[in-house]
Amino acid sequence: MAEFVGIDPAGARRLIGSMGDAVQRAKALRGPLAASIAEAGSDWPAGPGAETLDGVMRFLDEAQRDLTWRTQTIERIEGTAASAGGLRTAEFAFGDASSARAAGTLAGKRTLAAWRDYLKDPGVDNWEKVQAMLREGRGKTSDAAYSAGLLTALGTDAFAAVFTAVGAHNQNDPRGYSPENLKEAGKDLEPLAEAFASADAAGALPKGLRDHVTDRFPIGDMAALLGLARQSREFVLRAGAKVLQYSGNRDSGKDWNTYWLVKALGQDVAAAQGFLTTGDNATLLLRPEVVNGLPGTDFEKLLAKTLDGALAPGAGDAALRRDAWLAIIDLYSRKNFWPALTEPSPVGQVLAKHVSQYFPEIINVWNRAQDMGGVTEEKAWRIVDSKVIVGFFGGLLQSSAALPSLKAGYGDFLRKIDLGAEHPFGDAVTEAARKKQRNRFYGKVVSAGALASVLFSGLHEADLSQEKSDKAVVELLTLPLDVFLAGAGGKVVDGVIGETSLGKAIDIGEKNSLKDAIEGFLDGDGAGDASELVDSFIDVQVAAFNVSRQSHGHQPLGDSDLRELRTIFAGQLTPVLKSALAARGG
């Protein structure tokens, strides 16, 4: 008879922990209490003694085990989404763990008997009996106690043999089940896969079963376990590493085994982060022959979704996320891995979208390479070479779809540092306070220049057509002006400066905006050389800063301050701008 259950798993786990603590305290108290009672002798009043604690411990232990079983079960039942308060509700097939275990044991014995009959006479009728027994577990194997009983009675050898037999009936692809084949095989295998997963997650797998699966299972069957049920984190990591050893283009056919691995990683952020930071996993998973190894399928989108969950700002464990990023940055800094990011690249778009969370660390890496003083870095970033950073951005920029996300991150960074928020040379009362203002402003300019340098250097590394490269140069050069103007309320359309006080103040030609001038220069139609266009750009940057400053309610800078500001901008931006423009314009 089904039992309706409602549990808040998070609250239940806290209560389970509290009951465990209470048991430990009771155990620690019982000995001294019994000794004190014995020592008191007749002075101890009649009534319960230390044995009362035994009853308390038994109650707490039983309640703890029952609540643990209920919590583990409800977390595995499909369709039990938590309410706003964290409550999950479901109908349990069994009233308690012992009943579930007994039912599972009986089911395992009956399945084993059907399997043995099939081995004696492998005909259609006996195979259908095996199928009927396998399918009987559907809706029950989310219960860890039931599953432990089932798997123990069935035995490791029969468990493995059943997977092999179902594969022989359903698996047509030499490198794993296709989604269509796994859907068909899942009618028989899904209850077994779920039994393995729920018992494993509860630490109740029969001894040796997990080792047998990870060490001796065919790769296709191991991947099927990943695809059919949400497996434990430890199993995903172990089995995933084994699956990857056989990934790539070693054999003909599509690599569906890696597909199911990526699907499993996408169900557990911590598993995905841990997987990417372990051994050669990132290298094996993200190499071009794997990323591009399932054409005509949704594999790249599935991989991108998994990476999105693991690499997005705030996802999972911060240290694991950082280490996963460092592994990926190093990987895609190498040109032989760039084909994995060629257009269109869902993976590249995810990386471009989320890399901005590490712009401050990337800026520090760049500044360290330029021997800039005052650079402080987290230990994990100290060993990163600026050439690796540049190569990574070069890889991203292989796809034009990455540029909008990089621009958005770059723009957000410029808005956050907000150069026009305070006086660049200090307007505080004391010299010490003015010095702090100057240092802050200079640090912001250095950071903005460093980030621009990284992006333009990456653009130089990217293997782009002249047209695509020129378009990216124009967009990156005009972005800081867009940011200033947006903050100042100016009208910006597609990167072109509108009719604002700033637009009127800038003289770079009667009919050309800065964007037009850059495009003309890159096309070979503009007058002058790269140095002259850089001068014009810095003039515009200074004027834009002054408008931004006014938007904060500050007075415009005087001529002498503006000249000094122009010198500061020139010192930080000239090298990268000249490099970006001269590389194309001469």
Image (spheres, rainbow, N blue to C red):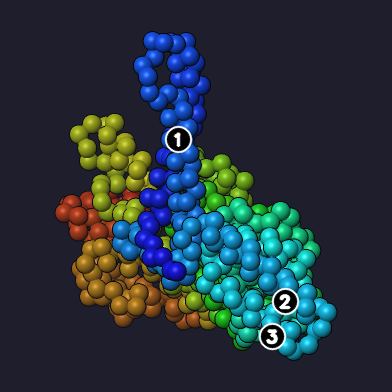
SS of the residue under disc 2: helix
- Mark number displayed over residue 55: 1
Disc 2 marks which amino acid?
Answer: Ala
Q: Quadrant of residue 394?
A: bottom right
**Quarter holding the N terminus?**
bottom left
Task: From the viewer's side, name the closer residue of 479 and 165.
Answer: 165
Left or right position of 236 against 173: left
SS of the residue under disc 3: helix
Q: Check the image and report above or below for 385 versus 488.
A: above
1 or 3: mark nearer the eye: 1
Task: Name the residue rendered at 66%, 67% in the picture.
Answer: 108
Q: Quadrant of residue 556?
A: bottom left
**Is residue 295 at all visible to an observer of this figure?**
no
Task: Name the residue rendered at 34%, 52% in the picture.
Answer: 417
Disc 3 marks which amino acid?
Answer: Glu
Dot placed on the residue nearer the N-terminal end, 1 or 3: 1
- The residues bearing labels 1 and 3 have C-alpha atoms spaced at a distance of 50 Å
- The residues bearing labels 2 and 1 have C-alpha atoms spaced at a distance of 45 Å
Q: How crowded is the residue under tag 3: few (<14 C-alpha within 10 Å), some, or many (20+)? A: few
Residue 99: x and y, percent?
53, 60
Q: Which residue is mark 2?
A: 114
Left or right position of 114 against 346: right
**Quarter holding the C terminus?**
bottom right
- Mark number displayed over residue 128: 3
Label 3 near label 2: C-beta < 8 Å?
no
Which residue, as the protein is rendered here, is positioned at the far right? 120
Q: How crowded is the residue under tag 2: few (<14 C-alpha within 10 Å), some, or many (20+)? A: many
Residue 27: x and y, percent?
50, 29
